[in-house]
Every structure is written in C-alpha cells, then in structure tokens.
Amino acid sequence: MRQAVMTSPGAIEIREVDRPKPGKGEVLLRIKRIGVCGSDIHVWHGKHPYTPYPVVQGHEVSGTIEELGQGVAQSSPALKLGALATFMPQITCGTCYSCRTGAYHICDSLRVMGFQAPGAAQDYFAVAADKIVLLPPGLSAEAGAMIEPLAVAIHALRRGGGVVGKKVVVVGAGPIGNLVAQAAKAQGAAKVLIMDKSVYRLGLAKECGADFTVDANSESLVDAVAKHFGPDKADLSLECIGAEPTMTQAILAARKGTTIVVVGVFGMKPPVDLAMVQDRELSLVGTLMYKGEDYVDAVALAATGRMTLDRLVTDRYPFKDYVEAYRHIEKAGDKAMKVMITLD
C-alpha cells in the first residue's frame, strides 16, 4: 500500500509499504479522505515544536471499516464491515493524574497520531477499536474527515463555559475559526461576530451563518464589538489565529470579567499584556484537543445538517499528489480553507 512520509520540513515521499494487519482489539480502516490541518502546515514549515521527522501525518480522517481484529466483534458489536468511521488520534498513558481524573486529552505523556506517532496518511490504517467513532448514514466522507476539527471547536466552546444565549467574538475566520463560529450558532449563541483580514474567508463565514463579519484591514475589533454589541460588549471571545496582534485585540476588546479562549496554535511566543488581564479580571483559558463527548457532539451536530462542512472544502488532491496539496496551500493563501487528500 501507499504511505506518505514527511521526511523533513517541506519534503514528502510516497512509499510502498506492507498493508497492516489489525491486532487484537484493533480495527483496520480503508482511508477515504484526509484533511490537511493548520498544525500539519506548521510541521511542513518545520515550526511545530513537538513533532520529530520522519513523520506520517493524517489525523483528520474518514474511512470505511475493512477488517476487525481479534475480539472486536464481541467487544464492539456496533462496528460493522463497510461502515464509515473516523477516530480519535490521541494516545494516552492512562496512569497520570490527568488520565485518572478524566482529562486524558491533556495526558502528561500525550502523543497524537500524525505528530508524535504515525498517522493515517496511507491506504489502510490500523487503530484501536475504542478510538473508532462511527459516522451516521448520509454523512459524506469529506464531512467525516472534518469531525476532528469540529470536535476541536466544540471543546473550545465548552472550555469557554458554553454559548447558549451569549454574544460571541471569534478572531480568525480560517477553518477552525469558521467551525467555532458555526458551532457557536448551532449550539444556541445569541449572536456571533467574526473578524479576519481575508475578505474571502469573511464572506464564507457569513455564508456559514456568522451574524457580523469584521474586516481587520479597516476596522479594529474594539470598534466592531462596540458597534455590533453595544457598551456591554461580548460575553465570550475565542482567539483562533495564534498571533500576538490578534491576542492583543481580543484582550483590548473583551468586557471586564469575561473569558478569552486561546484556540490558535502560537508558532512564536507572544508578549501578552498581563497587566490588563489582571486589572480587568479577564480569564485566559487554553484549549488543546477534545474528549469523547466532544466527538459525540460533533457527530450529532453534523448529522442535524446545521453545520456547513462540505462548503469549507476548497481543494482536493489525489493521494499521489500529496506534496502538491501542501504547495497549493502555500500559494493559495487565504483562498485555501480545508484541503482534502482523496483516496477513492
């Protein structure tokens, strides 16, 4: 079978390797779609601090169940051959404090498939049955590959204390920011404002249900929040870019006593005005990945049809052109939202 290996920053080789056999308690997936994530691009640029080379990427994935390992049919009878599924890519120790108290997604020894452990950038992938998440009939393979980033968005909103009835600010209209805004609306936010420099991405966010879009080239977040939400400002803010200027804007625009969820992955250490955080009693809350409940909610939301997932897929590349997908993302800039690798 084929396997895509990132041998070093900016270099991907397609190799022929043996097809894996599912071990005891494992499921073999025939991979259908692989989404390219912003974190994958950090690895491509050599700027991901926790990923060694060579690495097989692929953590935003959907596929069909091809084979069941020993004991799976008995322990997980819902897993049927041919069913469309995705998986949770975390590998945890099960013994540290976080794992013992249910916060396994921040395990002290956390490894993530596609980063610190081999991912699913190959024709077939064997994974533990308890990590498999079945997808509902009617959901496309591409939407299935977006359950992982949608779970990221849902977990971020959960970390912010929920959104029902709240006025929400989202800084950044890339794939994660768009999904955060969509999920906030779908989960009952009163109004959602999203900000970006890309007119294209703002237009897509509006199409996907954002109430207010703000062009950062011509308007500050402080002014936009005052204009659309009035003197009481927003109830919750989420920074989805991972850059010092946008973090600063989020802090400046936040109402005293509110929460800012740090969703974006910061490639460089940013200076943050902690004096303002202290003086205004702001809460800066980090969010990393997700838990099983976030996947359950993501699948349920996708099944309702209230999420616009397929619309976010801007480009598709066959597996043999894996490296071209990354090059395209660099060339296309803001016009590339979710790029899919296809294995049909």
Image: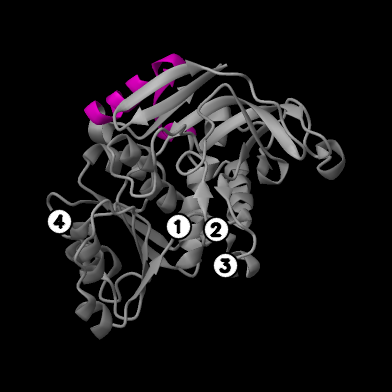
Of callouts 2 and 3, the N-terminal one: 3
Which residue is outermost to the left?
Answer: 218
Whether pointer 2 and pointer 1 mark residues with C-beta atoms closer than 8 Å, the reply is: yes
Of callouts 4 and 3, the N-terminal one: 3
Q: Is residue 146 left or right of residue 136?
A: left
Q: CA distance from mark 1 to mark 3?
A: 13 Å
Amino acid type at circle 2 is His
Q: Which mark is residue 64?
A: none
Of callouts 2 and 4, the N-terminal one: 2
Q: Is residue 336 magenta?
A: no
What is the quadrant of the C terminus in the image? top right
Of helix, strand and loop, which one carries label 1?
loop
Look at mark 2 in the image and give the residue it sits on. Answer: 105
Graded by Cα atoms within 10 Å as few (under 14), some (14 to 19) or many (20 or more), the crowding at tag 4 reads: few
Residue at the image point whose x is 33% and y is 52% from the top: 265
Of labels 2 and 3, the one closer to you: 3
Q: Main secondary structure of the magenta part?
A: helix
Picture coordinates of residue 261 (x, y %)? 38, 64
Amino acid type at circle 1 is Leu
Look at mark 4 in the image and give the residue it sits on. Answer: 219
Q: Is residue 259 left or right of residue 291?
A: left
Vertical relation: 15 (above or below) 241: above
Q: CA distance from mark 1 to mark 4?
A: 30 Å
Look at mark 1 in the image and give the residue it sits on. Answer: 288
Of labels 2 and 4, the one closer to you: 2
Graded by Cα atoms within 10 Å as few (under 14), some (14 to 19) or many (20 or more), the crowding at tag 1 reads: some
Of labels 4 and 3, the one closer to you: 3
Q: CA distance from mark 2 to mark 3?
A: 8 Å
